[in-house]
Image (cartoon, helix red, strand yellow):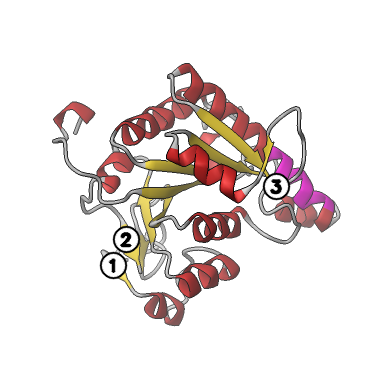
Amino acid sequence: MSSESIPASKPKFRRVVLKLSGEVLRCSETGDPIAWDTLRQICQQVKEIRQLGVEVCIVIGGGNIFRGLSGSKTEGVDRTTGDYMGMLSTVINGLAFMECLEKMEVNTRVQTSIPMNQVAEPFILRRAIRHLEKGRVVIFVAGTGNPYFSTDTTAALRASEIEAEVIMKATKVDGVYDKDPMKHADAVRYDQLSYIDALQQRLNILDSTAFSLCMDNQVPILVFSLNDKDSIKRAVLGEKVGTLVC
């Protein structure tokens, strides 16, 4: 389904946090950390939902460049140092998104949890909300500014702070299954789940800290595949895309 064939409609969500893994940017063919065609495709969808009047925040991981936890396990990097390296990787990805969006004439601001004044604004909640109200896309980078916390937790924290209506977690899988669909042909996909059901079944939707934040603050989580055509726009318009945890 092309973007032109999607009927115009009132968005279901007013303010969203789009959570992306850094791995979605990695070029599978060359191994380069950023596949610019993929980046442009994602930014085009962000532009389209911004044009619908949706206020958009992006939280991007850094796993395409460096993942702190795996670095500490395989390379012997100190966990704290590795996490800071991972946080700085998210800054690189955030700047790439900003550059791409600005070239598409989408006003964008990058806010960082680690002060670096020449590179990005510091995270200030009221300023972030003001940017959203003015129609700017806000990209949150450098995690929470603390080691031992993932970008899942960053997304949950920022979504709670800005009172986002949903966290849209774009993955390689088209929703939440009762077991790994890559290993089990009989895996069943859920259309909707409660927080309690997800906990009881130990479904790995977000890490435990992030999931607890979402549950405590009643922030819904929509898990969907970024590989599906126009999936971000379709989700914003309220089509049945992926799995909603609420």
Q: Position of residue 109 (x, y in %)?
A: 57, 32
Residue type for callout 3:
Ser
Task: Report the span colored magenta.
Answer: 81-89
Q: Residue at x 70, y 47 (%)?
A: 113
Q: Is residue 21 left or right of residue 227?
A: right
Quarter occupied by residue 73:
bottom right
Residue type for callout 1:
Gln
Q: Position of residue 233 (x, y in %)?
A: 29, 40
46 vs 187, nearest the viewer: 46
Q: Residue at x 48, y 70 (%)?
A: 217
Question: Which residue does the numbered mark 1 point to in the structure image?
Answer: 192
Q: Secondary structure at mark 1?
A: strand
Q: Residue at x 33, y 36 (%)?
A: 49
Q: Earlier in the sequence, mark 3 or mark 1?
A: 3
Q: Residues within 10 Å of mark 2 (few under 14, many from 20)?
A: many
Between marks 3 and 1, how big is the CA–CA gap?
33 Å
Q: Secondary structure at mark 2?
A: strand
Question: Which residue does the numbered mark 3 point to in the structure image?
Answer: 113
Quarter occupied by residue 40:
top left
Which numbered dot is residue 243?
2
